[in-house]
Amino acid sequence: MKHLIITKKTLISSLIDEHPEVQEILLEYGLHCTNCAFSEFDTLSDGALMHGLDDEDMDLMIRDVNEIVGKKK
């Protein structure tokens, strides 16, 4: 399995497909769009902005996601 570099520009659907274990973290941050049609087009940044996360919370969410993904290595 290839390693996906997770940034604000990562598509939500790609992230979930590659690392389904991060869905719980996204839900904790309020991104309940992990299974909706928009996840095919929306980035983490798009989802965070639509769900009211500020830049600091978005950065924390991405940090937490990368931490979980890093544990799989």
Image (cartoon, helix red, strand yellow):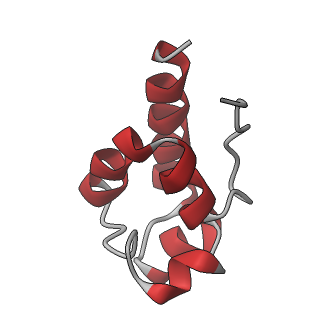
Identify the image quadrant of the N terminus. top right
Residue at the spot 40% in from the left edge and 77% down from the top edge: 51
User: Is residue 3 or residue 1 the one in the foreground?
Assistant: 1
Q: Position of residue 32 (x, y in %)?
A: 31, 72
Q: Residue furthest front?
A: 1
Looking at the picture, tell me which residue is in the foreground, 72 or 30: 72
Q: Taking the image as drawn, is residue 67 in sight?
A: yes
Please determine whether, in this image, residue 42 is positioned above or below residue 12. Answer: below
- Expressed as whole percent of the image width and height from the top left, the position of residue 6 reads 67, 42
Q: Is residue 56 above or below residue 35?
A: above
Q: Using the rendered view, name the quadrant where residue 13 is placed.
A: bottom right
**Which residue is painted at 40% across and 46% down in the image?**
20
Give the quarter of the figure containing the C terminus: top right
Figure check: 72 above or below 64? above
Question: Horizontal and vertical percent for residue 42?
Answer: 62, 77
Q: Is residue 5 left or right of residue 42?
A: right
With 1 as the anchor, is 18 left or right in this view? left
How many numbered marks does the figure carry? 0
In the picture provided, is 37 more to the left or to the right than 3? left
Q: Residue furthest bottom?
A: 37
| Residue 58 can be seen in this image | no
- When asked about the image quadrant of residue 59, the answer is top right
Which residue: 65% across, 68% down? 43
- Residue in view at x 49 percent, y 24 percent: 67
Residue toward you, 52 or 47: 47
Q: Is residue 29 above or below residue 25?
A: below
Across and down, in percent, residue 16 comes to: 48, 54
